Image (cartoon, rainbow, N blue to C red):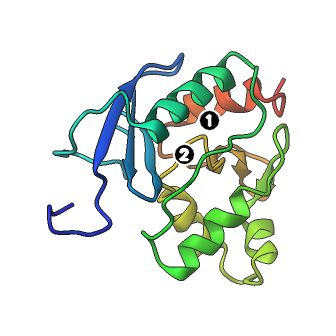
Amino acid sequence: MPAHDPHAPTASLRTTSPLGPMLLAATEDGLAGVWFVGQRHGPLRHTWPEDARHPVLHEAASQLAAYFASRLRDFDLPLDTRRGTDFQRSVWQALRAIPRGQTLSYAALGRAIGRPEAARAVGAAVGRNPWSIVVPCHRVTGSDGSLTGYAGGLDRKTALLRLEGALH
């Protein structure tokens, strides 16, 4: 993201998780992203200054740790949702409505946003979700319930769904 971009993150934080290192980024408006380091569609390089004391990043790291320890069911973080198209933002909002321990197909997600014919576009928007785990894109499956497409990798998707009780 160019330095002159008014939506560019202003701070970052690297944190650890049971599924690998993660990069968190924030703007003055909220959490701008949560990615597994090296995941598909994540930032390749960034110049965002590290700031472990940034309140949003500190809280995000704390909530992620509680989530992985099964002490947190739902994230409560301010998200900077200015990035993405209107369609992507509608998909990302719908992802937040999928309850922990449940999954939803791409087609059902398309129906939920009033775009039943848009399963492929929904899949593309899910894949570009910048808030891995916090906005639970890992809860979306193929129409037959199969585990498909996760920018962080299918091993991580499987582990997240097991942690949430959606897989046994």
- Disc 2 marks a residue whose amino acid type is Tyr
| Contact check, label 1 and label 2, Cβ < 8 Å | yes
* Mark 2 crowdedness (10 Å alpha carbons): few <14, some 14-19, many ≥20: many
Which numbered disc, 1 or 2, marks the residue that appears first in the sequence? 2
Q: Position of residue 51 (x, y in %)?
A: 30, 33
* Mark 1 crowdedness (10 Å alpha carbons): few <14, some 14-19, many ≥20: many
Q: Is residue 2 left or right of residue 139?
A: left
- Residue closest to the eye, 123 or 63: 63
Please give the name of the residue rendered at 51% of the width and 57% of the height, measured from the top-left corner: 129
Q: Residue 150: which numbered mark, if any?
A: 2
Q: Which residue is mark 1?
A: 157
Q: Position of residue 12 (x, y in %)?
A: 32, 39
Is residue 17 among the parts visible in the rendering? yes
Is residue 120 among the parts visible in the rendering? no
Secondary structure beneath label 2: loop
Position of the N terminus, as image quadrant, is: bottom left
Please give the name of the residue rendered at 84% of the width and 37% of the height, measured from the top-left corner: 101
- Disc 1 marks a residue whose amino acid type is Lys
Q: Quadrant of residue 52?
A: top left
Q: Is residue 127 left or right of residue 111?
A: left
Position of the C terminus, as image quadrant, is: top right
Reply above or below: 118 against 98.
below
Q: CA distance from mark 1 to mark 2?
A: 6 Å
Reply above or below: 71 against 131.
above
Q: Position of residue 110 (x, y in %)?
A: 73, 74
Reply above or below: 97 against 59.
below
Q: Position of residue 148 (x, y in %)?
A: 62, 48
Please give the name of the residue rendered at 81% of the width and 73% of the height, measured from the top-left corner: 112
Q: Quadrant of residue 122?
A: bottom right
